[in-house]
């Protein structure tokens, strides 16, 4: 049987993103949610989901906002204002064949965000991974913290659409949410069609609504709303129920 995890990333990014994710959980298909522990809206976002039966993960954020660690302890990760460097800065360095931040600085901030996650949620994450930045060192830094605290590490390789969760193979379903004509329902159905038997697949979406903060700080905007609409569409839920697919969350792997 085919197995599918439907996940919403970026809880905590902004109030509007939180509210869009909440709708996909309470009224839609999402059963796993990744939280950005360093963001001011992380704790309010978690409170919105109080009582929901979901897997909550640490979606470590190394490229937006104020770090959880002391900026003086992570100099390669912050700018002159003590704010985390942008995803654009990571991409530009990666294109030059350079690593923007050291593994030690990454691991320090990842650990600080883990401790903040525990403050907010009151327990360990159900899965442990990171918001995408262009870096060959990221998985190594994550693995270091995961080993220290015995965390359920989700090691992803987007370039090969593969990865491992707690050492077991998983399949990453392609994410093409950037085109202006993005059809979230069509892409979701296409992804379900790519599922391999017995290898758990992950549809990693970014559903949300929009506010001033997200419009000023993210290149992914209107397509968040399209994913939110798709993942709360009763017709899509009915279609998925007709497929030979077992829907899971990370706690079941």
Image: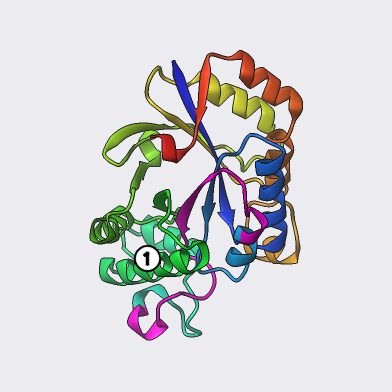
**Is 65 one of the magenta-colored residues?**
yes
Q: Position of residue 45 (x, y in %)?
A: 63, 60
Q: Nearer the viewer, residue 145 or 106?
A: 145
- Near mark 1 (Cα within 10 A), the count class, few <14, some 14-19 or many ≥20, is many
Q: Is residue 127 above or below residue 164?
A: below
Question: Which residue carries the number 1 mark?
Answer: 110
**Is 199 one of the magenta-colored residues?**
no
Q: Would you say residue 72 is visible in this rendering?
A: yes
Q: Nearer the viewer, residue 76 or 106?
A: 106
Indicate the secondary structure of the residue bearing disc 1: helix
Q: Position of residue 47 (x, y in %)?
A: 63, 60
Q: Position of residue 246 (x, y in %)?
A: 50, 22
Q: Would you say residue 101 is visible in this rendering?
A: no
Question: Measuring 40% from the left and 55% from the top, which residue is drawn there?
Answer: 134
Q: Quadrant of residue 133?
A: bottom left
Q: Is residue 72 above or below residue 19?
A: below
Q: Nearer the viewer, residue 143 or 125?
A: 125
Q: How many marks?
A: 1
Image quadrant in which the C terminus is located? top left
The colour style of the image is rainbow
- Outermost front residue: 51
Q: Position of residue 178 (x, y in %)?
A: 62, 43
Q: Is residue 244 above or below residue 28?
A: above
Magenta region:
47-75
- 29 relative position to 109: left or right: right
Question: Measuring 45% from the left and 29% from the top, which residue is drawn there?
Answer: 201
Image quadrant in which the N terminus is located? top left
Q: Nearer the viewer, residue 214 or 159?
A: 214
Q: Quadrant of residue 171?
A: top left
């Amino acid at each position: 049987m085919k197995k599918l995890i439907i996940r919403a990333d970026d809880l905590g990014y902004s109030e509007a993103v939180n509210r869009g994710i909440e709708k996909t959980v309470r009224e839609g298909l999402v059963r796993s949610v990744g939280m950005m522990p360093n963001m001011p809206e992380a704790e309010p976002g978690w409170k919105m989901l109080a009582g929901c039966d979901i897997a909550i993960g640490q979606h470590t954020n190394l490229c937006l906002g104020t770090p959880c660690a002391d900026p003086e302890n992570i100099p390669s990760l912050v700018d002159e204002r003590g704010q985390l460097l942008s995803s654009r800065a990571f991409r530009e360095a990666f294109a030059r064949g350079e690593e923007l931040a050291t593994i030690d600085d990454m691991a320090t901030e990842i650990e600080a965000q883990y401790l903040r996650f525990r403050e907010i949620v009151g327990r360990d994450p159900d899965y442990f991974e990171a918001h995408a930045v262009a870096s060959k060192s990221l998985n190594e830094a994550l693995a270091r913290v995961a080993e220290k605290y015995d965390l359920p590490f989700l090691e992803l390789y987007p370039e090969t659409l593969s990865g491992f969760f707690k050492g077991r193979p998983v399949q990453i379903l392609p994410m093409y949410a950037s085109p202006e004509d993005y059809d979230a329902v069509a892409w979701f159905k296409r992804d379900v069609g790519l599922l391999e038997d017995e290898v758990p697949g992950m549809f990693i979406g970014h559903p949300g609504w929009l506010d001033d903060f997200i419009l000023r700080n993210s290149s992914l905007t209107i397509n968040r709303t399209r994913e939110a609409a798709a993942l709360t569409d009763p017709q899509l839920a009915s279609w998925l129920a007709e497929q030979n697919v077992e829907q899971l969350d990370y706690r079941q792997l």
